Structure formats: C-alpha cells, structure tokens
Image (cartoon, grey):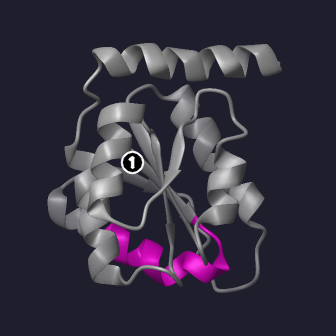
C-alpha cells in the first residue's frame, strides 16, 4: 500500500506528524507538500492527491487543512474519489469498511496529533468489507457517471 499526502499551509504540522507515523510503520508514501508555511490554495493540493490516487490503483490519500472540510469538498469532485472527513478512529474504520473511502481528510485545528495518528492507523488498517456495501459503493459510482 502507498499513501499520497498533502496539506495546505494550515495543515502542515499535522501532515508532518502523519509522515512521521508512516515512516515508523514502514509504509510507502509520497508527500506532495507544501514544504513551507507560505499561504497556498488547498484546491491545488487536494486535486494533486486525488488525481494520483485515481491513477494509481491501491493507493490511499491523506489531506490536511485547517478543518479538513475544504480538502474533502475538492477531493470528492474527482471521479473515483471517496474522501471522508474523520474526527475519530470509529469514523475512519467505518468509512473504509463500508464506503471503501480512498482519501482521508483531517483538520489540524480540529484534531490533535495523537488523535490524528489513531485515525490514520484505523484508516490504513481497515479493509473494505464488500458484500452488501459493494452495491452501495457501486451506486456512488453510478451517480458519478450520471454527472459527467
């Protein structure tokens, strides 16, 4: 599994904390930045991650901004992305198990580093259950297809 991460300027510290966790786990990752605290536009970074997750099957994305809301809105505009804004480990497990979410969104101003680490661990360690949930995820794909 490979993880693609990015943030905006308001999420840089939390993203760096999550990069440290991925290193500790030995998880392959790519950090798309930014590398400075200079103001940037979150849609640019959310789109980069979303495009890469879609183009590399089996990858997961992680996006961090101040609240996680902007990143999740932009990521979900991309066909094939099921981005979930999570504030708890329970939400992270459920969105992977039931929604086959492929992008985790977090808010640096909402969750602390310890909670965010737990959320990311839960997201990465939970597999999609399939079964009855597959039909529902397919309906999400059908909605996407109708929009284009």
> In which quadrant of the rendered view does residue 42 lie?
bottom right
28 in relation to 121, above or below:
above
Left or right: residue 145 compared with residue 7 = right
* Residue found at the far right of this picture: 148
At horizontal 23% and vertical 58% (from top left) the residue drawn is: 121
At horizontal 51% and vertical 15% (from top left) the residue drawn is: 138
* Percent x, y of residue 67: 59, 74
* Percent x, y of residue 117: 28, 70
* Percent x, y of residue 107: 53, 73
Which quadrant would the C terminus be assigned to in this image?
Answer: top right
Residue 20, visible in the rendered structure = no
Q: Secondary structure at mark 1?
A: strand
Please give the range of residues in magenta: 7-19
The kind of secondary structure the magenta stretch mainly shows is: helix
Residue that badge 1 annotates: 3
Left or right: residue 131 compared with residue 13 = left
* Percent x, y of residue 66: 61, 78
| 125 or 31: nearer the viewer | 125
117 in relation to 138, above or below:
below
């Amino acid at each position: 599994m490979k993880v693609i991460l990015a943030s905006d300027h308001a999420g840089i510290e939390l993203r760096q904390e999550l990069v440290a966790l991925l290193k500790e786990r030995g998880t392959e990752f790519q950090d798309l930045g930014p590398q400075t605290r200079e103001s940037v536009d979150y849609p640019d970074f959310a789109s980069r991650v979303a495009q890469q997750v879609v183009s590399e099957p089996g990858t997961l994305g992680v996006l961090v901004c101040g609240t996680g809301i902007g990143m999740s809105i932009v990521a979900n505009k991309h066909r094939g992305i099921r981005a979930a804004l999570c504030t708890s480990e329970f939400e992270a497990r459920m969105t992977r198990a039931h929604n086959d979410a492929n992008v985790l969104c977090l808010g640096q101003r909402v969750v602390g580093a310890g909670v965010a680490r737990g959320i990311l661990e839960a997201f990465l360690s939970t597999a999609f259950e399939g079964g009855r949930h597959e039909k529902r995820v397919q309906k999400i794909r059908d909605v996407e297809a109708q929009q284009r």
